[in-house]
Image (spheres, helix red, strand yellow):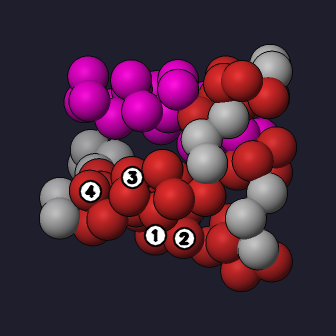
Amino acid sequence: MAYSAKNLHEDLQNELKSGYNPRQISRAAVKIYRAHDRELSPYLDNKLLQLNTMQESPELEFSEGEFRHLLQELNRG
């Protein structure tokens, strides 16, 4: 079964329980990517890679608003 946008939405939404933390979200994205790399559509692959890079530099971090917009986009499936 393919890992879907809804699955990613749920997993990332769980990361917000303790508040918005770009490094924590980026680490979670790495775990998700490793666990589901063969199941990802090109779109989800791209989004997870973008989230992964947030660890590299503050300039690459999504703002909280950008991250919440991504969650809305994923929720629409």
Q: Which residue sits at x=42%, y=33%?
A: 47
State the SS at label 2: helix
Give above or below for 27 relative to 38: below
Mark 1 highlights which residue? 10
Do labels 1 and 3 touch, CB within 8 Å?
Answer: no
Cβ atoms under marks 3 and 4 closer than 8 Å: yes
Callout 1 environment at 10 Å: few (<14), some (14 to 19), or many (20+)?
some
Q: Residue 13: which disc?
A: 2
Q: Name the mark nearer the viewer: 1 or 4.
A: 4
Callout 3: SS: helix
Local secondary structure at mark 1: helix
Residue holding disc 3: 70
Q: Is residue 34 magenta?
A: yes
Q: In the image shown, does 18 or 63 lie closer to the viewer? A: 63
Amino acid type at mark 3: Leu
**Residue 61 drawn at (x, y percent):** 68, 35
Sequence-first tag of 1 and 4: 1
Is 75 magenta? The answer is no
Q: CA distance from mark 1 to mark 3?
A: 12 Å
The three-letter code of the residue at mark 4 reads Glu
Ranked by sequence position, the earlier of labels 1 and 3 is 1
* 62 sits left or right of 71 in the view: right
Specify start and end residues of the magenta stretch as a single range.
26-50
Query: For this view, does 44 lie left or right of residue 55?
Result: left
Indicate which disc residue 73 carries.
4
Q: Are marks 1 and 2 in contact (CB under 8 Å)?
A: yes
